[in-house]
Amino acid sequence: MSFPGNGRQVDVLEDISLTIPRDQFVSVVGRSGCGKSTLLRIISNLIAPSRGNVRINGMSSEDYQRRRKFGFVFQEACLFPWKTALQNVELPLEIMGMKSTSKRRERARELLGLVRLDGFEDHYPAQLSGGMRQRVAIARALSYEPEFLLMDEPFGALDDFTRREMHDELINIWKSRSLTVLFVTHSLSEALYLSDQIVVMAPRPGRIRAVVPVIEPRVADPAIRASANYARQIQQLETLLHEQ
């Protein structure tokens, strides 16, 4: 991927070749500016690559997007402030043509229950904490049952306690349905706790440095952070980043 800038071409991504297994949780880590977010946007067809292509289950990313198989969660929850939590989750279903108000609401309530926001259906975003707003954003992204969920640093703005709480919630959500997740983060600990495998990117231009399988993936047990395997893999990831 290249962009024009200051009279010259800026190469953002180069020689990216990556296979993401279906129904796995894959994290992407790397220094700022290595193209992690750009890669997510190319995969989800929000932007087109300068060269090359993306294939998902045999389809182009454009066809996959047209079939509404992508869900996307950004760093900011991006909720409509004049809509309640329930209405925010309902919105994609309304846009997609689900005419039955009762069915839309039933689906939205089910998803708000999934992210543990029972009782907050009628709250507006300003009445919710940062973590709660991100839960609504996740519920909204799941409303039309995507097969592929892309998450761009969704917990980056949260305090450490809320962030860790959201990790276990996300693992439980992943286990409850058939989902492939591609998750961008700056946190090695977060990537290691959540993932089946971790893609380490090198910067300028962004390229894949390594793909690291996680020894003990997604156990949803905070005690795992004190294990020898966890410490060993953190050191392995830090070494890969420092070598750049």
Image (cartoon, rainbow, N blue to C red):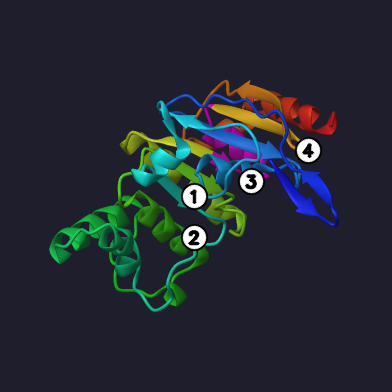
Q: Are marks 1 and 3 in contact (CB under 8 Å)?
A: no
Query: Which SS class for mark 3?
Result: helix
Q: Magenta span covers which residues?
A: 183-196
Q: Earlier in the sequence, mark 2 or mark 3?
A: 3
Q: Are marks 4 and 1 in contact (CB under 8 Å)?
A: no
Q: CA distance from mark 1 to mark 2?
A: 9 Å
Question: Which of 226 and 88 lies nearest the eye of the viewer?
Answer: 88
Q: CA distance from mark 4 to mark 3?
A: 12 Å
In this orientation, does residue 120 appear?
no
Q: Nearer the viewer, mark 4 or mark 2?
A: 4
Q: Nearer the viewer, mark 1 or mark 2?
A: 2
Q: Nearer the viewer, mark 1 or mark 3?
A: 3
Q: Which residue is mark 3?
A: 38
Q: Are marks 1 and 2 in contact (CB under 8 Å)?
A: yes
Q: CA distance from mark 2 to mark 3?
A: 25 Å
In this orientation, does residue 130 appear?
yes
Task: Identify residue type, mark 3.
Answer: Thr
Q: Residue at x 21, y 63 (%)?
A: 105
Q: Residue at x 30, y 66 (%)?
A: 86
Vertical side of 28 occupied by 15: above or below: above
Task: Identify residue type, mark 4.
Answer: Pro
Task: Identify residue type, mark 2.
Answer: Gly
Asked if the stretch drawn in magenta spans residue 187, the answer is yes
Q: Which residue is mark 1?
A: 165
Q: Which residue is mark 2?
A: 131
Q: CA distance from mark 4 to mark 1?
A: 34 Å
Q: Nearer the viewer, mark 4 or mark 1?
A: 4
For label 3, count other residues whose C-alpha is less than 10 Å away and answer few (under 14), some (14-19) or many (20+): many
Find residue 205 and name its label.
4
Residue 57 in the image: state x and y as whole percent: 40, 27
